[in-house]
Image: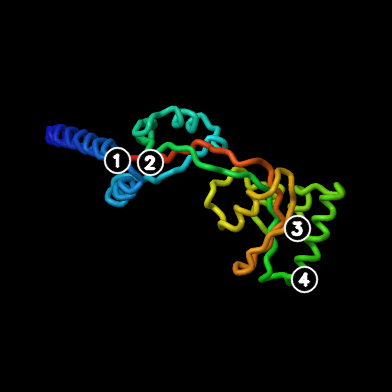
Amino acid sequence: MKYYFTLLIFVPFLCFSQTKLEASIDSISTKEEAKIFLKSHKNETKGKLITFNKEKHKTKLATELFELSKGGKKVIKSENGKTIYKLIDKKNASHYKASIMLFDSKKTTIAEINSLRSFILKGIQNKEHKFENLARVYSAHPTAKTGGDLGWIKKGTFSKRFEKAIADKRVGQVFSFDEHREKKHYVIMKTQENQDIEEIIVLKITELK
């Protein structure tokens, strides 16, 4: 009887806590508010802000989240608890697409890098070699495994100089580019024209048991 009485007290309290938590989530409308929520509820929930890109993210979950209006929610229940996704923001952002090879002058001399880039550019221009094959062999960038393909990159990800150099080129053009202060040197190929791509920022919250 004692345990039954304790349970009667605990269950309404649990329901009240969950209702209060969901009400707090419902009141969030900006990234800043989401960050404050995550910080203040870190002992009750596990959460993070996620950015989904319509061209990059093609999962069933991502598709369903893109269908939500701003402020909309999707709730997924499982044996381990409940996860809430709330759409905080939705907008189009300018993206560009390129492939790169990176060379680091902290490890290799500029003379050696320029000699190698000359060989690479000549081989590509003469159609003796493909960009992706050379990237797999020579690039120091993590994308070397995928032939240097950066995918769709949101404008503002790299430096203004880097992005302007790409914007000024035609699709398919291959060229050298240097960021001397960072000691980074590139061979770049512009692969597609700029495109506005829909992005959403989603707050993911999982209630801790």
Q: Position of residue 26 (x, y in %)?
A: 28, 36
Q: Residue at x 72, y 70 (%)?
A: 108
Q: Earlier in the sequence, mark 4 or mark 1?
A: 1
Q: Secondary structure at mark 1?
A: loop
Label 1, on which residue? 28
Query: What amino acid is labelled 4 in the image?
Result: Ala
Q: Earlier in the sequence, mark 4 or mark 2?
A: 4
Q: Nearer the viewer, residue 164 or 128?
A: 164
Q: Is residue 164 left or right of residue 137?
A: left
Q: Position of residue 22 (x, y in %)?
A: 27, 36
Identify the image quadrant of residue 20.
top left
Label 3, on which residue? 138
The residue mark sitting in front, 4 or 3, is: 4
Q: Are marks 4 and 1 in contact (CB under 8 Å)?
A: no
Query: What amino acid is labelled 3 in the image?
Result: Tyr
Q: Secondary structure at mark 2?
A: strand
User: Is residue 76 positioned above or below 104 on the image?
Assistant: above
For marks 4 and 3, give the CA distance: 15 Å
Label 4, on which residue? 111
The residue mark sitting in front, 2 or 1, is: 1
